[in-house]
Image: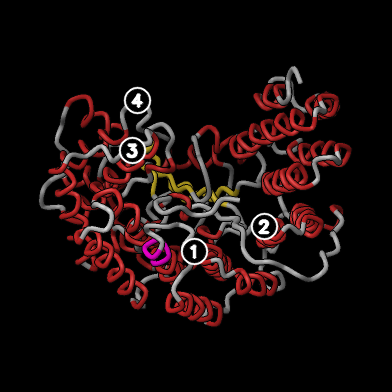
Amino acid sequence: MPTPEARSISVLLFFFLTACARQEQDAPAPVAAADAPPAEIERPAGIDWFDGSVGEAFAYAKSERKPVYLYWSAEWCPPCHALKATVFRDRTFLARSKLFVPVYLDGDTENAQAIGEKFSVLGYPTMIVFDPDGQELTRIPGGLDIQAYANVLDLTLGNSSSALSLVNRVMEQGDALNEPGCRVLSYYAWNQDPKILDQYDEQDAHRRIYDACPAGLTVERSILYMNYLDAAIDAAEEAETEIALNDAQKAEAIAIVEMILADPELSKANMFPVLLSGASITKALTEEGSAGGESLAQQFHAALERIAADESVYKRERIYTGIGKIYLERIDDSKAALSEQLKAEIRSLVSWADKSTPDPYERQPIVNAAAILLDEAGMNHIARPLLLAELDRSKQPYYFMVSLADIEQSAGNHIEAIAWFKRAYETARGPATRFQWGYYYIKGLIEMSPKDADLIRRTTISVIRELEAGSGFYQRPKAQLARLESELREWSESENNADALVGIRDDVLTVCANLPAEEESQKTCRAFLDAA
């Protein structure tokens, strides 16, 4: 399961299924699939969500000349619960929402994945604003402060230019951005749109957008600059070279980063880079062991201390300050033991988060964040009881069962790990969710019980059958299906078991036969393990 890396800002804005602590009790008794409760989709309270299909919502929006606010979510998604606990309770945001046609689309509802593929949705949560004629205007990222959400909605009401058109004008015509255009792009969810920079070099695009922004917009320019710096570091890592900035550019970067770290408003506007990127930025811009590097790291640490103590900052982000401190302590050695002082801080932070969060829905992002922090710290003995206790409190306990499975797998307790993966799959709700959790189960079997070809075959066909209803062979399940095929091919090759793939392929074709012939899902299904 994925864990956060030093600069993986987008990872923390989607969902986590992390390795946590070792579990030493007996494996749980599996729950029969027939006993799994049906999915009951709960819309976030407060917003007057459109009561009808997505197509009907767009038709209504056109007739009323109102823009559409589309919110793509899942019941188990921790960042989605964070939005419910913060933004969707804010009066300012709720007032703005009345000026839109708000549409809630849960990933487990019928045809949701097909709609998600149409709109190129990558993950939960995704928030897209369309004009009254159905043209996409912008995508709103998670992790903004509440006022910023309201500001983005205001921008889409008063500015007819889409984010894509603004990017193209900057990149192709060299246009300068006016203030509304700059704000639209500074608050754009770049990591949730796979196409907007498809034809451009990402580093160059972010730099040119930053340069095109009015000089007086300090907050917006700081956000745009950090996008550029993140892209530059990414490009260097992908090329396995030093950061592609000259000395003057590095000096500029240090000056801007130091300005952000010294200003509480700018630090909050760049919350996730400040929380998670301190170590990687320091390493990229300064020499190892230099006074400049030590100074920059200390400034990141001071900003983390300030955020952790700021009661106006959401609890999840305050928890993530611990991750930033871990990265800074391990800046020269990712395997280094943590100081006793930092471990004590982490224990205190987790205890505070646990005790101060009674609401079971809000606990989803908070306990998840705490478990991520403990995993990064190597403090699995604390994460284990936290997660076990959460199974009785969470409305989606299967989410945490995968973390418990990872605990056992990391400890070498394969029987217990597989039992947790199985239980998580069998108690998950909704076709897309059950397919995703089924994928984790199959992956666990391949990794820990590769000789059991019959169980892997039976489980694979059972999991794929989850997608028979509701046009499921799209978007997230489609991507997961591709990963599953890759896993199965590698397993077959390593086990010298080509016959197993042929058997799975034959079973899957019986599923494909039940799908409408004219649908794209039929093609996706039939392509699985083709020529196995």
Q: Secondary structure at mark 3?
A: helix
> What residue is disc 1 on?
82
- SS at circle 2: helix
> Which of pointers 1 and 2 lies earlier in the amino acid sequence?
1
| Of marks 3 and 1, the one in the foreground | 3
Q: CA distance from mark 4 to mark 3?
A: 19 Å
Q: Nearer the viewer, residue 355 or 469?
A: 355
Judge whether residue 99 can be spotted in this image.
yes
Where residue 368 appears, as percent x and y from the top left, is: 56, 64
Amino acid at pointer 2 = Ser
Magenta highlight range: 325-329
Residue identifier under label 2? 410
Q: Nearer the viewer, residue 358 or 376?
A: 376
Q: Which quadrant of the rendered structure holds the C terminus?
A: top right
Residue 199 is tagged as 4
Amino acid type, mark 4: Gln
- Magenta residues, dominant SS class: helix
Residue 176 vs 300, above or below: the answer is: above
The amino acid type found where label 3 is placed reads Ala
Sequence-wise, the earlier of marks 4 and 2 is 4
| Nearest the eye: 29 or 74 | 29
Residue at point 62%, 63% (across, down) = 20
* Rendering quarter of residue 452: top right
Q: Residue 41 or 326: which is nearer the viewer?
A: 326
Of label 3 and label 2, which has the lower sequence position? 3
Measured Cα–Cα span from mark 3 to mark 1: 33 Å
Residue 527 drawn at (x, y percent): 70, 22
